[in-house]
Image (cartoon, helix red, strand yellow):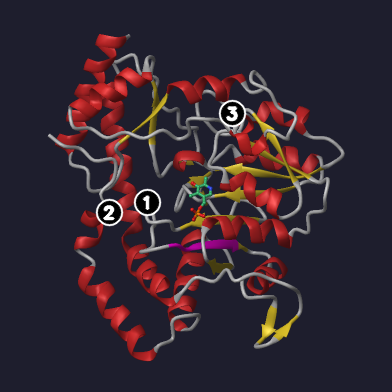
Amino acid sequence: MQVPFSNLPAQHEKLHTEILEQWRNILKTGNFIGGKYVEIFERNFADACETKYCVSVGSGTDALRFIFLALDLQPGDEVIVPVNTFIASSEAITQAGATPRFIDIDPNTYNIDTTRLPKAINSKTKGILAVHLYGQPADMEAINSIASQHSLWVVEDACQAHLAEFQNKKAGSLSVAAAFSFYPGKNLGACGEAGAVTTSDPELAATIQKLRNHGQSRKYIHDIEGYNGRCDALQAAALTIKLKHLAEWTETRRKIAEQYRKELEQSNAILPLILRDTYSVYHLFVILVQNREKVIAYLEEQGISTGLHYPIPLHLQEAYSHLPYVPGDFPVAERCAEMLLSLPMFPELTGEQVSYVSTKVIEALKIYA
Ligand SMILES: *Cc1c(COP(=O)(O)O)cnc(C)c1O
């Protein structure tokens, strides 16, 4: 049996007619940038996230960068960010003029270890970037309460967490502003690059609307210098169609996760812990295993593709060699980075495939434990 890590063609197969019909309309008008398709998507996505505003942009990275620019970071300012995340989380902080302040993760949820927050905060700290990694919201109750004690803002990196919930509130509505990515492989993926900011703050929304469009308030009236960071109409139209299916796809991801849990219960893989009060959308299903390279090779031989998210924590990346971090600074993330293994996880996986992957993981762990 072959089990790919993801299968986008299968997801789009049933949507071809609907997407192509909208794209034909756009081709006929030539309105590729801005316009009604973009506005409709923004309205629908803001509703889905239970926020007042959604500002669509060119990518999740744009979304993060524009949020930090709108928050007016100054050289020397620090933003706290966990070391186990995609580099876009910290790139955006640097590109907005500040410095990432790395922090370790919780060994059970892989999200920010909130017990370490008080020690990471100093006079330069301006805010905290809460990354909802693998689809599970970070502990926003603890993060928001520590932040408010120190007069810091909180931003969400919700790029892996479309429709996730914490205490019955949607990811994207749990902080001053949130960044979403619609990179094709995300839970809600475009047919190209796209992203969005959600917020209920009218001033932030207005600033980010300007930032994505060269600082314009009206055509050729530039209030500030901005960027070319818009979401185009073709992406917006496809996203509106796909958004209608997202709740159902998410439920299927959760069922797949349940099946993995049941089948892997007796194995010696460590399974992800889901916090009480959270609704995880399982962008990824990440387990911890010993002898990972051998396990990966064994699974590959059996036709199963896996992923690594992420193999090197940010503080050990060459890109951050100028920052004062050394191996051993974040022992939990460093240990997890050597053990974590992402199993196939996408809504079109069949129960049979999940069983097959689980059986082969158990076999591999018996041989290499
Ligand atoms: C995908 C992702 C991003 C960046 O999104 P792009 O759309 O690829 O720019 C940022 N943060 C996290 C956690 C992501 O998974």
Q: Quadrant of the N terminus?
A: top left
Q: Nearer the viewer, mark 3 or mark 1?
A: 1
Q: CA distance from mark 2 to mark 1?
A: 7 Å
Magenta segment: does it hold 194?
Answer: yes
- Residue carrying label 3: 105
Cβ–Cβ below 8 Å for labels 3 and 2?
no
Q: Amino acid at mark 2?
A: Leu
- Give the left or right position of residue 313, taking residue 360 as reference: right
Question: Disc count in the image?
Answer: 3
On the image, the x and y values in percent for residue 245 come to 31, 60
**Residue that extends furthest to the left in the rendered view of this protein:** 1
Q: Residue at x 50, y 59 (%)?
A: 49
Front residue (pair 216, 325): 325
Magenta segment: does it hold 336?
Answer: no
Determine which of the numbered discs, if any, sits on residue 8 in the image. 2
Cβ–Cβ below 8 Å for labels 2 and 1?
yes
Q: Is residue 160 above or below residue 195?
A: above
The tag earlier along the polypeptide, 2 or 1, is 2
